[in-house]
Amino acid sequence: MTETTGTSTRVDGIHLAGIGTFVPDAVSVRSAARRGLVDEETSARSGISGVAVAGDLPATEMAVRAGAEAIKNSGLAGADIRLLLYAGVWHQGPDGWGPQYFVQRELLGDDVLAVEVRQGCNGFFTALELAVPYLAAAPEGTAALIVASDNFGTPLIDRWQLGDGLAYLGDGASAVTVSRAPGPVQLRSLCSASYSEMEGAHRSGLPLFPPGVTVGTSVDFRSRAESFRDAAISGGWWMRFLAGHNARITQCANRALEEAGVARADVKYVLTHGMPRQSAISYLRLLGFPFERSTWDFARTIGHLGASDHFVALHHLLTEGALGAGDHVLLSGYSPGLTYKSAVLRITADAPATA
């Protein structure tokens, strides 16, 4: 079913049977600037025009809505699903409680292994990596449901003030059903890489204990990144870190394409995390693709949706009829750790995966 070389995996016989999303209405960045939430010059430079905002709708409620759509679009019965993986970036509800069980209760019932996956914005990729060997070992007809959801509208993070190179944070959820049965989207490969020397990039300047949330410390990625950069520059490591970071982005995508047997010329779209325009241009250049083959024009209208960016964008392409049988899509991203992920999908039907 799979053949693995290092952290690259060629995947055979795994399909995405259904895709579901829930993205709330967007708040325009222009209106946020009028309210003093963002700097007008900075927002104009970013190119981002809107940010999806869920208000007081819990992340788990959005996950249920996306998951229900994914199950409906797959044609599977809830009884077919034996694995539930829930990915989130931000706090999901009361501490000491598992959001995956809320989705399980609402959609699937008790005969399911339900697990929360915490790997930042790459959590959906990691969930796919866990689902593939599970399905390989499971009885025929077994399926998995992967969901990701976040609502960033809480006091300890400011969705509008994350720092240079980062997009405004949008709320939303995505879900896919994964199965060995033939389906409209085939998973061709997965690749993971990491750069543990840079794990301090997202915590620099802060103590490890007590955890910030327990003492009401707000998240300030800008100051953490500046602290890490300044220390790396003074220590003479900064250029090595940048080179290593960029190399892992490229190598991860290269290996995913190689394992899938797909050339860059055969990739119709590249799906990335939500980013400001210039960051997206630079990232696509590292991946070896023109900016025009990205879905940035869509992403700019909703912001960075945590772990849901890639599959919300895929859902958008499918519902708009922008993908057809035989098309290939490359998904790439990186997140705190640092971790790097890439995957290649092949569209196998002209009207796939959405209602």
Image: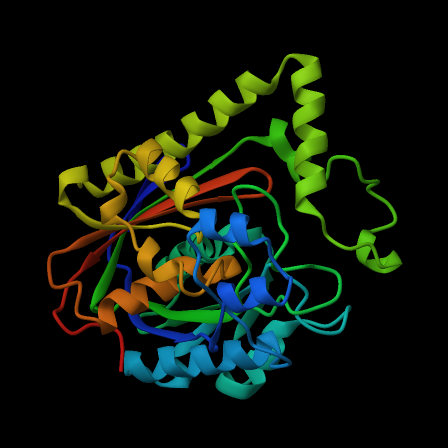
Residue 16 located left or right of residue 224: left
Task: Say whether residue 180 is visible.
Answer: no
Instruction: Give coordinates of residue 9: x percent, y percent.
Output: 34, 42
Q: What colouring does the structure picture have?
A: rainbow
Which of the pair 270/98 is nearer the observer?
A: 270
Which residue, as the protein is rendered here, is positioned at the far top?
236
* Residue at 29% in and 78% down: 74
Residue 155 located left or right of residue 188: right
Which of the pair 347/4 is nearer the observer?
A: 347
Which of the pair 7/167 is nearer the observer?
A: 167
* Residue at 33% in and 85% down: 72
Task: Say whether residue 163 is visible.
Answer: yes
Instruction: Give coordinates of residue 16: x percent, y percent.
Output: 30, 66
Query: On the image, which quarter does residue 102 sit in?
Result: bottom right
Residue 150 located left or right of residue 232: left
Instruction: Give coordinates of residue 67: x percent, y percent.
Output: 44, 78
Query: On the image, which quarter does residue 184 sit in?
Result: bottom left
* Residue at 51% in and 53% down: 43
| 236 over 169 or under it: above or below | above
Which of the pair 103/238 is nearer the observer?
A: 238
Circle count? 0
Locate the C terminus by quadrant: bottom left
Instruction: Give coordinates of residue 64: x percent, y percent.
Output: 50, 81
Residue 36 located left or right of residue 6: right
